[in-house]
Amino acid sequence: MTARTAVFVAVALGIAAGACTYLSDEPTPFRPPGVTSDVNAEQRGLELYERDCAWCHGSAGEGTSFGPDLNGPLDGGAYTHFMLATGQMPLEDPEKRAAPASPRYEAADIDAIVRHVETFGGTGPGVPTPSPAAGDIAEGAELYLDNCAACHSSTAVGGALTSGEVVPDLDGVSPVVVAEAMLVGPGCPNTSRTCGPGEGAMPRFELDERSVNSILRYIEYLQRPIDEGGAPIGRVGPVAEGAVALGVGVVALLLLARWIGTRTGDRE
Amino acid sequence: MTDAARGGARGSRSERERAGVSLPGREEPPFQDRIGAWLDERLHLSRFARQALDKVFPDHWSFMFGEIALYSFVVLVLTGVFLAFFFEPSLTPTTYEGPYEPLRGLEMSDAYASTLRLSFEVRAGLVMRQTHHWAALVFIGSIVVHLCRVFFTGAFRRPREINWVIGVTMLLLALLNGFTGYSLPDDLLSGTGLRIMYSVILSVPLLGPWAAFLLFGGEFPAEQILGRLFVLHIFLVPVILGALLGAHLALVWHQKHTQFPEPGHTEANVVGSRLWPTYALKSVGLFFLVAAVLTGLGGLVQINPVWLYGPFDPSQVTSPAQPDWYLGWLEGALRLFPNWEIRAFGFEIPEPFFPAVLVPGITFAVLYAWPFLERLMTKDQAEHHLLDRPRDRPVRTAFGAGTLTFYASLFAAASNDLVAHWFELDIETVTWFFRVLVLVLPPAVALLTFLVCRALRDAGDVRLTHLPLSSVWRPRARSTHR
């Protein structure tokens, strides 16, 4: 066997392994079937809660061995809406770690479930109604850099924390959801039974309305910032820049040097 | 009046020509020739120029890597001069009133405000700033590629050790200038980098606090530091770099360039193209290509959008925070080194000392000493003008490959948080993965390189892809037809 055959076999094995990973069974996401009955929102909320949530949280939000109770001091509209709107709930498997994903319900259904959960004993804040347009963008920039940039990044791309916590990217996140996160302090691993709202990776921020609106306005700006200077290459800073400088700049120049440095006829 | 006089002169000359009258010696040579003659009588330049234009340089495309660095440096100087017209190296607080709305009314340093002005108000300011930054990244990248070419082909051997030492010094200065430049805009990201550098200097046993205070002029963030970085960045280091560059090229000129062993190439001759016209035109062409790639990047790809990072404030921090690529290996070493409390002679040696002072210290000590270390090992005292093929020097090539792997692994480890984020892994797992990788991969790569090189060397003129695998593991007698 020559080295060339060995390289060929290695590449072929790699492609085969990659193909297997790609073709292996992806778990199909949970999609509740559409309901055609003309139930009102109250019944709809109850129906969806009983069908998708009560398994783990109990039919009155009292909690079971699979999921925490929903009657704590910070539980309520804001936290419920946050978990549903960020797609972290419902879970297919209570042992699985919840992660931000596209929401499993339409907005009206989320509102219906939220209203149902609000009839439980949680005393936490309700769904906020922020108005980013009322905020001051420069004030928001300062508050954002003070309080949010350390984890979510000054460019809002998110990042990693210790012990596997993921700080979400804020791109595409609605102002309501961000306001809820500031009110409740989410980020508990759902696999932990000892951690509740307000004790998660994200601190709870008790800010006045104007500050909240200003931060939201700055985050809205960061979602579509002034993009002078060309392609933003991910907005992660020097890592992407280094990749472009070496992978594009230096490589291009080496190829160009080879082009002009080789006489016609010298090339094999 | 003058017109008439000139007309008259022309008239008389054409009259002489028509009449076939020609007085040899009386015809005045053209103006530029007279200037040339005047200069030559005084400076005797023509002999030198004749020799210089005819000087032969060996042709190989890999000999142009250093030129890429040279021309990146030229672009750096040109764009840097432009930037220096508008940049204010001062930490004096000011209230921003410029056109960038999200920061209007915030307090920031003059340095940051003038960087915003350069980016949004000065005509062509942003493309100059971005080209300057891209040029810095490519400059150091091409130096490293050039260094690898010189290393793996043994071009540093006697009599070229001095040029090796000059080259390594230029790499060191380029790193220093890269870092000082990265720190100048006083944005949140670079301020974090400067904070790390301050801590690294503090960590040097005994000398650290003195050195840090001397350099920064006080406790971080000291007022004076930016002005000092500026002088280092635009004056001191570039001037030394320029002088060393001159010496580097003069030595190449004087000692002549090395060439690859080929039929007709000997230790005593130089086979290639004359400086004029072939080599000069090729080199000028390369300059335009380098300038095109760098300004192309500067115009098309965003780099260091400081307006998004915000002004530096010691109470704030942003993440992910990495240095520019050329300091990634140091950042990676800092991230991987365990937080051991190491005590010696009753003092605690702060932990950053080992990854951020000792690692680069050893790196550059070995780099500087390599030609001399290699001579100690090979006992080879002879002059060499013919290059080695990397396969013919398995030990050197293996050492180089292993070392490169070590620094590449450290470099990758500097992005452990991004790796964790992108691959949805635990950051500690990623860190441990890189700790193992940094220790295991380099020896493995070195061993494999050694075996492959030895097999290639012993197999004679065989391409890597046609090498029988069995010969890699079993050494056999060197073939005689090498």
Image: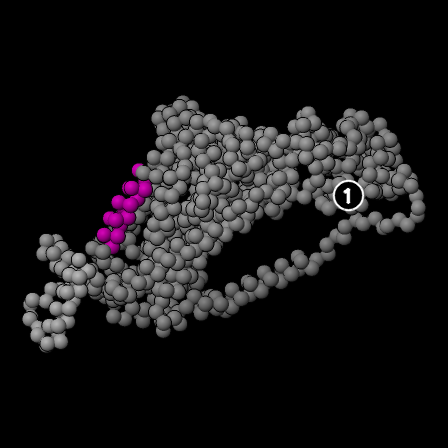
Q: Residue extending furthest right?
A: A38
Instruction: From this view, report whether residue A206 is shown above or below residue A181.
Output: above
Q: Quadrant of residue A14?
A: bottom right
Q: Main secondary structure of the magenta part?
A: helix
* Residue B103 percent location from the top left of the image: 55, 33
Instruction: From this view, report whether residue B210 is shown above or below residue A44.
Output: above
Q: Is residue B91 visible?
A: yes
The stretch in magenta equals B236-252
Q: Residues within 10 Å of mark 1 (few under 14, many from 20)?
A: some
Which chain does tag 1 point to?
A
Residue drawn at 48 percent across, 38 percent down = B116
Residue behind mark 1? A91
SS category of the residue bearing label 1: loop
Residue drawn at 44 percent across, 31 percent down = B110
Give the position of the N terminus of chain B as an image quadrant: bottom left
Can residue B243 be found in the magenta stretch? yes
Q: Quadrant of residue B47?
A: bottom left
